[in-house]
Amino acid sequence: MAVKLGYWNVYRDPHGYPEWQAMGLPVESEPAHLALRGEEPPAPGPLHGWAMIWTLLGIFAGGMALNLTPCVYPLIPITVSYFGGQASLGRGAQGRLVGLGLCYMLGLAATNSALGVAAALSGGLMGAMLQSPAVLIGVAGVLVLFATSLFGLWEMRLPGGLTQAAARSYKGYFGSLFMGLTLGVVAAPCIGPFVLGLLTWVASMGSPWLGFVIFFTLSLGLGLPLFLLAMFSGQIERLPRSGGWMIWVRYLMGWVLVGMAAHFLRPLLPGAGGVFALATVALAAGVHLGWIDQNRAGFRAFSWIKSGVGMGAVALASFLILSWALRGPGVDWKPYSHEAVQEAQRLGKPVIIDFHATWCTPCRELEEVTFHDAAVVELAGNEFLMVKVDVTHGGNPLHEQLLRQYEVKGVPTVVLLDGSGKERPDLRLVDFMPPDQFLTRMVEVRGGESPGKE
């Protein structure tokens, strides 16, 4: 049985004991300590490289968009007036204004980042169960439930006393810090469903560090516009008036949650079902936000924004479908068998063994991008034995034996054996790798040359 613990996808034997105990290793050898002991660097988390950058940029943009919801937007003049009034007391008004704004953003970041870390810590068990279809369906259901709140089917309300206490103004730097800490309470009916949906996603990853970074980024997106408007409070009159366009922003956040739900369901959908699910959500969101929704605004740019978002979503749906339809054939994988590996060794043919799970995001990236690259497919078909070991559900005695034999700590793990049947540890892959880089490793293991040799 395979479970996911933090950054690690850890395997357990059929009796429920961790692999390192089943192998007779002490408890201190568990993956959380391996990096410190220098035995094996931890596998990258679910977000890394460009995926991390684009995700954080999207979350930052989402935080900025939350300022345009009906619960937060009316607070902008109040917040800016508060900062202006506080800064006008005494000398050094501009410097005091900067200090107050930073305290406000610090309070906002402290609240949200603490939520992110707590969700990730409590999500260790949740992440471990993500291989269960019931859990994936449950998580997707929670996200859709919160999305329906943003679509206006139900309203999230907090006790009136709590809301009034949070909305009360306090003077000085502590007052600004307190306002930032409690913004989430005041704006909960609008931002609450989106934040809770994001918490569900962070909990599924089980990484406190990622939880902190994601919610700190969200806080920057939410607080930065307020900070800048406070610094240039004279521009507040240029802001558009409240109107139906803020309801449109809520719908946009709702569709983001529906897209996250479709992402969680991808491992359960056979073949190209996951791609079609995401494309369907993008198409439905584009048609709804761009043309079906009848909300209007008092500024001309809104109609252009609606059309732009609609066309962008439709273009995204088209790209997903076309990129799947136009991609070439993939690698012809074989199930593992000792006989096939021994025959390859007798022929001097190198072997690539891919330890894979459907719930593993980098595994899917490898399969959809690297292992569908024409050059990789051609070289693999001509000169390699390509073996797939699917550990999605666990419990297979042969797979458990292979996990111990090759000391696999997580997925993805791609093991490269040279023509003599010996592994090249320096070429082992534990993360997504672009086709050109993977092709270099294939050429190297085929030639049997050690790194640095001519």
Image (cartoon, rainbow, N blue to C red):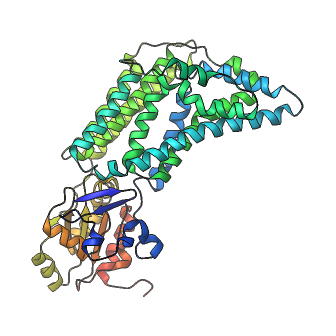
Image quarter hosting the N terminus: bottom left
* Residue plotted at (59% across, 30% down): 182
Q: Residue 45 is drawn in which quadrant?
A: bottom left
> At which x and y percent is residue 437?
39, 67
* Residue plotted at (52% across, 48% down): 212
Q: Residue furthest left?
A: 339
Q: Residue furthest front?
A: 161
* Residue plotted at (38% across, 85% down): 450
Asked if residue 403 shows in the view, the reply is yes
> At which x and y percent is residue 91?
89, 31
Q: Residue 72 is drawn in which quadrant?
A: top right
On screen, residue 60 versus residue 128, left or right, reads right
On screen, residue 416 versus residue 214, left or right, reads left
> At which x and y percent is residue 382?
20, 72
* Residue plotted at (78% across, 32% down): 97
Between 84 and 23, the one nearer to me in the picture: 23
Vertical arrangement, residue 347 with respect to residue 98, above or below: below
Vertical arrangement, residue 215 with respect to residue 401, above or below: above
Asked if residue 454 shows in the view, the reply is no
Between 304 and 265, the one nearer to me in the picture: 265
> At which x and y percent is residue 328?
24, 54
Image quarter hosting the C terminus: bottom left
Vertical arrangement, residue 438 with respect to residue 240, above or below: below
